Amino acid sequence: MASMGVNTIRTWGTDASSKPLFDAAAANGIRVVAGFWLQPGGGPGSGGCVNYLTDTTYKNDMLAEFPKWVDTYKDNPGVLMWDVGNESVLGLQNCYGGDELERQRDAYTSFVNELAVKIKAVDPNHPVTSTDAWTGAWPYFKKNTPALDLYAVNSYQDVCGVKSAWEQGGYNKPYIITETGPAGEWEVPDDANGVPKEPDDAAKAAGYTRAWQCITDHKGVALGSTMFHYGTEYDFGGIWFNLLPAGEKRPSYYAVKEAYGKSTANDNKPPKVDALQVEGGTSAVAAGKPLTVSVPASDPDGDALSYEVQVGSKYIDNGSALTTVDAENLGGGKLRVTAPDRTGVWKLYVKVKDGKGNVGVGTTSLKVVAPPVTGTNLARGRTATASSFQSDPTGGCPCGPEKAVDGDASSRWASDWSDPQWLQVDLGAAKAIRHVQLDWESAYAKAYTIQVSDNGSDWRTVHEETAGNGGIDDFDVSATARYVRVNGTQRGTGYGYSLHEFGVYGG
């Protein structure tokens, strides 16, 4: 970081584990905005609804804990200042509303003042600030927190409006921007598949450049910024923001380096990756089927390029991890991969590496759907019953049996969390059945049978699965019956059985 011109970093918490970071920072000429976490907070790690009017136990604990760590590290040369709280003025809206929210915000910022006074009594040599998520928090700090030496705000797309907010608010204290960069997931419009449209590498790099220009334009008031780079992870958030995931330099790395006054003229630069193109489009990708992706990429230094393809299920199950998938290089910037087996909107990432420690990343969303089946879905809209279903209004439920035959891949039947469980559909009359398609949610059946009946009482098995892994199950059967049942005998997870669609097909 020092080589790219960084002289300050920021943390969200300070405790016994902070010493190695402070020492390493000092050894490299870097100082730390040392944070202290207060509930509810914002961003990763947020949560918890403290009542700042009445919860004296929590407040007394923080009044004892924070000054203890200040005393521990006040003479460490890595410390630049103390930062009390992160986005809690905004975050309190997740706990309270109306007049009570206003009372809690006043109480919270008054408590931050108590902490600032305590911290200064222990360490009068380092300034104290408090970070929030938008300048709308500053009036509360102005009114209730006079002990702060400066303000702090996390601002991404709106960072260029901070200067005018400061001027219009009549503030007389300087500020720092404690997080900034390109537009975040919460600020961009949705794409054609209904999920946030992630900026490309060039737009992300330009976002850092723009932010720094706006910060330095407010001379004598905006004292600087810690650009947002939260780690070296290659996960959902890491692809969106990290400058150095796994130590590989992205275009944003060089944008920040240039913004901080360092030359990149002699640096080997990352590959340039333009918008990914998916043959057949991205809005109806058949689950588990081959998929051809065009990756328009070039390297400014003429380096040979290699490709890695990953997928993420953030918009299906809120998972942040990415999974590497096999990719066949077809030449000409085209790759053949296999679409995920589970339906829903996935993120597809293609990393393009130059072998010199640089990487460009292209990304798009994929709406994965069940593969088409010829013939008529005899179960669609028919009467369905089940051994159990989840009726509580949580997790997208109630999730009754009718949800599995409504033709909507976003709805689901969900059973109790026990074995066995069954779901059956009445076709209305005896019908010739030749194919079954099951579209499992993440709570799938490892073992199940497909049974048919003429009277709804006497059942015969026409298909058995003992090693299911979820996603889409497609198989032929041969039967004539009025009733069709999926009978789950072993769950694949600790949850129940959850089925988006139960398709029963005739000729």
Image (cartoon, rainbow, N blue to C red):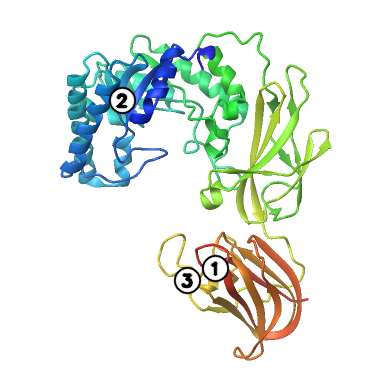
**Mark on residue 416?**
3
Measured as percent of width and height from the top left, residue 344 is found at 60, 54
* Label 3: which secondary element: loop
Q: Amino acid at mark 3?
A: Asp
Residue 226 picture quarter: top left
For the question of whether residue 322 can be seen, the reply is: yes
Judge left or right: residue 33 versus residue 412.
Answer: left
> Residue at the location (69% across, 75% down)?
464
Q: Is residue 186 above or below residue 29?
A: below
Circle 2: residue type: Asp
Q: Give the Cα distance between marks 3 and 2.
A: 46 Å
Residue at horizontal 73 percent and vertical 18 percent from the top: 300
Q: Which mark is residue 83?
A: 2
Q: Horizontal placement of 336 versus 504: left or right?
A: right
Residue named by callout 1: 497
Q: CA distance from mark 3 to mark 1?
A: 7 Å
Mark 2 to mark 1 CA distance (whole Å): 46 Å
Q: Residues within 10 Å of mark 3 (few under 14, many from 20)?
A: some
**172 relative to 464, above or below:** above
Q: Quadrant of the C terminus?
A: bottom right
The residue under the point 54% across, 75% down is: 421
- Residue 121 position in % (x across, y down): 17, 20
Q: Could you tell me if the residues under marks 2 and 1 are in contact, i.e. CB atoms within 8 Å?
A: no
Q: Nearer the viewer, residue 114 or 15?
A: 15
Residue 26 against residue 434 in the figure, above or below = above
Amino acid found under the numbered disc labelled 1: Tyr
Nearer-the-camera pick, 12 or 348 = 12
Badge 2 or badge 1: first in the primary sequence: 2
